[in-house]
Image (spheres, rainbow, N blue to C red):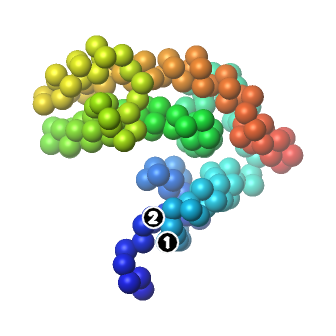
Amino acid sequence: MFSSPPKTVFCILIFMCSINGRRHTTTPITVKVYIGPTRRTTLEKMAIKFCCFPKDPLEDTTAWSESIDKLLGCKSGQLAFQEFLRSEYSEENILFWLACEDYKKIKSTPEMIISANRIYSEFVQVEAPRQINIDCGTRANITKNISQPNLNSFDTAQRLIYSLMARDCYPRFLKSEVYQRILTKANNS
């Protein structure tokens, strides 16, 4: 089908949407679309429009304005917030927070070690591709203990990022075009 592997593989799942590898609905009907990096944003917006925010009433979207916990407690809220943070070039915050939430659910030690190293190399270490903004003491503590991770290895950093999102990003999200568009759609449903 392809002479060389595509640069970006992106799945739009009709009834089981997967954006950035995160599944948030359960009916497994999948459509795969292979694209280059320039079309990714368009397809992500399509996936959010047609899957993450279905034509059914969006009952919980107004609750998102009550607290960041209500926003982050809803999969479509997480995706909307992620879209907003991407527009502000701070998507690494929600991605790190979500990775930490998934990390806390790990049961096996080998899986914990692999996941801890992935989180560390992607978000925590200096010059990481999606380096989060945490103080040097927290970063040094994680670095010191990464060889023997536990379920609490990233708790301090996760609290700092959560606080940053709650204090700084969340109020701007509530005023953003992304959220206002979702509210309009919910009110028109």
Q: Position of residue 73 (x, y in %)?
A: 54, 32
For the residue marked with disc 2, what is the amino acid?
A: Thr
Q: Position of residue 72 (x, y in %)?
A: 55, 32
Mark 1 and 2 residues: CB-CB less than 8 Å, in contact? Answer: yes
Q: Residue at x 75, y 42 (%)?
A: 182
**In which quadrant of the rendered view does residue 137 lie?**
top left
For residue 182, above or below residue 1: above
Q: Residue at x 57, y 41 (%)?
A: 86
- Which quadrant is the N terminus positioned in? bottom left
Classify 10 Å Cα crowding around label 1: few (below 14), some (14-19), many (20 and above).
some
Q: Position of residue 172 (x, y in %)?
A: 68, 26
Residue 97 appears in the rendering: yes
For residue 59, above or below residue 152: below
For this view, does 8 lie left or right of residue 104? Answer: right
Front position in the image: 106 or 38: 38
Q: Residue at x 47, y 52 (%)?
A: 20
Q: Along the polypeptide, which appears first: circle 1 or circle 2? A: 2
For the residue marked with disc 1, what is the amino acid?
A: Tyr
Q: Which residue is mark 1?
A: 34
Q: Could you say which disc has been placed on residue 8 in the image?
A: 2
Q: Position of residue 167 (x, y in %)?
A: 58, 16
Return the residue found at the far front. Answer: 127
Front position in the image: 72 or 88: 88
